[in-house]
Image: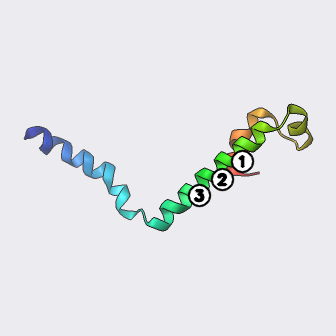
Amino acid sequence: MSFYAQSRPHADRVFSGFQTLTFGAFFAGLRSWNDARVTRRELNALTDRELQDIGLTRADIDHVALMGR
């Protein structure tokens, strides 16, 4: 019982962020994740020459996929 009493405040802090998560925010995050995944896949399929033509390197792919250009 003492474990529950000691761990409850920590669990309350961890799960408190989920109370404000709406379905719209959840699906927006899911869509953003999927867009980044597709962008990353498409850019990785390009050759180094094609990436150079659009002003990117392989090291830029993750940043572009997450933040845009």
What is the secondary structure assignment of the residue under circle 2? Answer: helix
Q: Residue furthest left?
A: 1
- Residue 20 visible to an observer of this rendering: yes
Of the pair 42 and 10, the residue shown nearer to us = 42
Name the secondary structure under disc 3: helix
Q: Are marks 1 and 2 in contact (CB under 8 Å)?
A: yes
Circle 2 residue: 35
Type of the residue with mark 2 = Asp
Give the Cα separation between the discs numbered 2 and 3. 6 Å
Crowding near the residue tagged with mark 2, few <14, some 14–19, many ≥20 C-alpha atoms within 10 Å: some
Amino acid type, residue under disc 1 in the picture: Thr
Instruction: Find the distance from the CA under tag 3 to the CA under tag 1.
Output: 12 Å
Q: Is residue 11 above or below residue 31?
A: above
Q: Is residue 7 left or right of residue 1?
A: right
Quarter of the image where one finds residue 3: top left
Residue at point 42% right, 62% down?
A: 21
- The crowding category of the residue bearing disc 1, from other C-alpha atoms within 10 Å (few below 14, some 14 to 19, many at least 20), is some
> Disc 3 designates what residue?
31
| Residue pointed to by mark 1 | 39
| Three-letter code, disc 3 | Arg
Q: Name the residue rendered at 71%, 41% in the picture.
A: 41
**Cβ atoms under marks 2 and 3 closer than 8 Å:** yes
Q: Tell me the CA gap for discs 1 and 2.
A: 6 Å
